[in-house]
Amino acid sequence: MTVFLNYSELRQLAQRRLPRGIFQYIDRGTEDEVGLRHNRMSLDAVRIKPRILTGDRPHSQAISLFGETYDAPMIVAPTAFAGLVWHQGEIALAKAASTEGVALCAATDSISSVEEIAAASRGPIWFQLYLWKHYEMTQALLQRAWETGVRTLVVTCDTAVGPNREYNARNGFDMPFRFSASNLCDAAVHPRWVLGVLARYMATGRLPGFANYPAGFESSIFAAGKALPYDRDLSWEHIRRLRDDWKGNLVLKGILRVDDALVAVRMGADGIVVSNHGGRNLDSAVAPIQVLAKVVDAVGGQITVIADSGVRRGSDVLKLLAIGARAVMLGRMPLYGAAVGGMSGASQAIRILRRELDIAMKLSGCRDFRQMDRSLLDMSELLH
């Protein structure tokens, strides 16, 4: 197993192991990538004011979310095509998450099916939903998820249209995947990926595709098939209908405004994710940490508030928790870990963040999350 000590080292390893198109799909933002930089700058603008001489009492990262107890306040975020960074990458992530005692949210656009992911996990899994234009197909997928034991549904609400990710077009990383001399040469110089990922799918007679889609709809990412479009006319009426149809926990992902958070409460949502999609959608969107305090103040007493986007260190997790988030979603770091070492790489990535969070808590004088609040932070340099 390759040794890495932090996010930056892990990212460099993943970049070497993955073809450019796949790595950039995970790593990059959109348009001029202002959003990526702004996420990082905003997290760095918040500083910690540590308490001292608090004693060496036991520390705990345990958290309860929607009736389930986890060892740490972290959730492996849903990401499309995780099965391309490692053979059955979603299954590797599910095993890593359950081993490390954190939650995992499976994605609609995953290479492994929700049934396969649930079977691989020793703990409960969540499921992320993009609504298809044909709602009866969405209902069928929800029924599949429910029958696997999924009880927490995370609806992505911030992708009304496909974002302007110009690097995807340049790399041929559209659907279906377009072959060119450039990306064929790129794959050729990554033989470990070709043999360890693509060839293993081919050996089973199953090319990577959208395992959660109904039969007949884009069965392979390399072949043009019958398209199953997303519903781009999303509105609060869709959420109202989902609330009627889904009997489990309903979480809305992509909230960046207090007024939207308040509507989410009125619609009966159980939670929200304050998120700008990791800087991968609207390049000029505010950073989640800029608006998190106001959102928590408005709705945190009524629903569960989760945050994500730009987390690289355990101290980033501490900052978001101290502002008021109940937990933090992790996107790129577990994926980089899976790219480097499958389940063991993803596990190591999660352990690094947990260890960094533990150190940050101890150096800040916090025994548990009840001792984390905004008095621990200096947010004077954070732009509002």
Image (cartoon, rainbow, N blue to C red):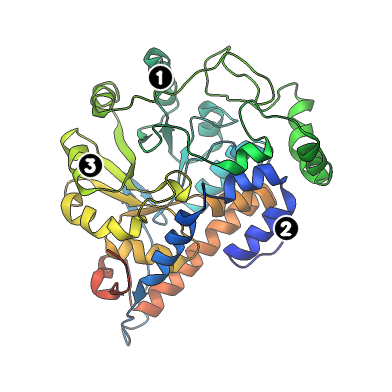
Crowd band around label 3 with a 10 angstrom C-alpha radius: few (<14), some (14–19), many (20+): some
Residue 74 in the image: x percent, y percent? 42, 53
Tell me, for residue 260, which label it has, or none. 3
Q: Pick the residue in front: 139 or 114.
A: 139
- Regarding mark 2 in the picture, which secondary structure is present there? loop
Q: Are marks 3 and 2 in contact (CB under 8 Å)?
A: no
Q: Is residue 11 left or right of residue 303?
A: right
Q: Is residue 224 left or right of residue 268?
A: right
Look at 54% across and 17% down and name the residue there: 227
Q: Quadrant of residue 160?
A: top left
Q: Amino acid at mark 3?
A: Asp
Q: How many marks?
A: 3
Residue 35 in the image: x percent, y percent? 45, 54
Crowd band around label 1 with a 10 angstrom C-alpha radius: few (<14), some (14–19), many (20+): some
| Residue wearing tag 2 | 1
Look at 43% across and 15% down and name the residue there: 137
